[in-house]
Image: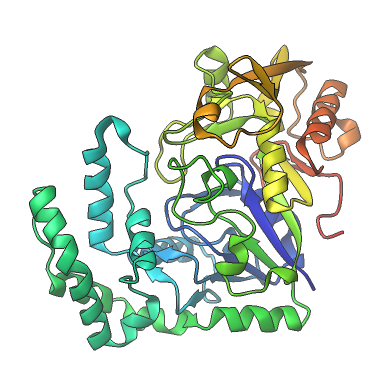
Amino acid sequence: MPAIVIIGAQWGDEGKGKATDLLGSRIDYVVKFNGGNNAGHTVVIGNQKYALHLLPSGILTDGVIPVISNGVVIDIEVLFDELEALTARGVDVSKLRVSANAHIITQYHRTLDKVTERFLGKKQIGTTGRGIGPAYADKINRVGLRIQDLFDENILRQKVEAALDQKNHLLVKVYNRRAIMVDEIVENLLSYAERLRPMVGDTALELNRALDDGKIVLFEGGQATMLDVDHGTYPFVTSSNSTAGGASTGSGIGPGRIERVIGIVKAYTTRVGAGPFPTELFDESGEFLRSRGFEFGTTTGRPRRTGWYDAPIARYSARINGVTDFVMTKLDVLTGLATIPVCVAYDVDGVRVEEVPVSQSDFHHAVPIYEEFPGWTEDLTGVREFSDLPPNAQAYVLAIEAMSGSRISAIGVGPGRDAIIARHDLLD
């Protein structure tokens, strides 16, 4: 059976959990393959809302085995806080699997993230301050801590000493902060070791065997395409590969096993943090989208920047990820608008550009070229068939589908878990 990848096709917060829910009981494993607790999924089940930051949203689906794989950086305190919160609400979390090769976010990563961002002043990137970037930097610099290191105190201590030898010089001499003690870090991490041990294993082996046995494995990306460290709006990006290719390196399954790539787009666009955003709105339309869509970060609570749908970005995401299907979310948010602009191209220094410019400078100065579509006033939240949508809503979806590079197989029409219109089978 195939591996399926779900990725955000814009700047994140598109509602990736909606696609996971749509596949529901047909999935055997849901795998988080990148990022950390710097992003969040909000899932609404009945009248219950669940905000997940580190755990894959599949942990809320009965019978699914949730996996945190090697490409993730894990704040262990956050992990157990989330597990305890779900347990208190009656969710079974006993099946969670954690890769022994996943890297650990420590106190010194969080400290460095915050002081470095403040030090940048007006040049801030807009990180969440949760230590994600510094943890990935240590991974690449080969001084990181991995989950498996918790089970050998001598190795753990040696690695913490090596990491702090350099970082304390930076904290004390550059940022005028206190030095962090080795014992402080080691004791904190060891306090979680025995609680974590039953969850830890060779998840790459387990996932490959599951695929061999005909299981359906869903890979759930954190953040989104335009935040990918290689393919996003660098340097205003995350520190991992949040595109479909990251599912292979971040989990240990071969790329040939991936048969479906599902890209999630909102019916408009949002972004959190700094960086270029061609269709960003600064008027009442932007506030309309923010308030109607409740566009505030699941993890940070920060107001999201809002803008109209950007078709060149969707095409770019379709190309970079090999998207086979799009799932559009939050179509209902647009209800009540007389007209709905869609960015179909950019004006860059007087030249019409149909695709996302490769030059960061050009993209920063790109002016959106809009095509306007008539809106609708009907409530969409109870609609479950595409043919029952208002004609103008149908026309909007079909127009976006034609210019986005892949079919739109499902449409979200409300916050509820079942508030979705299925047009095509995501596994067919």
Q: Is residue 389 visible?
A: yes
Up the image or down, 292 lies above or below 174; here it is above
Q: Is residue 329 visible?
A: no
Of residues 22 and 227, the one nearer the viewer is 227
Up the image or down, 320 lies above or below 246; here it is above
Q: Position of residue 286 (x, y in %)?
A: 54, 19
Of residues 54 and 144, the one nearer the viewer is 144
Viewed as shown, does residue 83 lie left or right of 333?
Answer: left
Up the image or down, 410 lies above or below 91; here it is above
Up the image or down, 115 lies above or below 359; here it is below
Q: Position of residue 377 (x, y in %)?
A: 75, 17
Of residues 70 and 294, the one nearer the viewer is 70
Q: Position of residue 173 (x, y in %)?
A: 8, 52
Q: How is the image coloured?
A: rainbow
Q: Quadrant of the C terminus?
A: bottom right
Q: Residue at x 8, y 48 (%)?
A: 176
Q: Residue at x 58, y 23 (%)?
A: 279
Viewed as shown, does residue 11 lie left or right of 254?
Answer: left
Q: Residue at x 43, y 46 (%)?
A: 299
Viewed as shown, does residue 108 lie left or right of 192?
Answer: left
Q: Residue at x 10, y 60 (%)?
A: 179
Total numbered labels placed on residues in the image? 0
Quarter occupied by residue 161: bottom left
Q: Position of residue 327 (x, y in %)?
A: 73, 44
Q: Quadrant of the N terminus?
A: bottom right
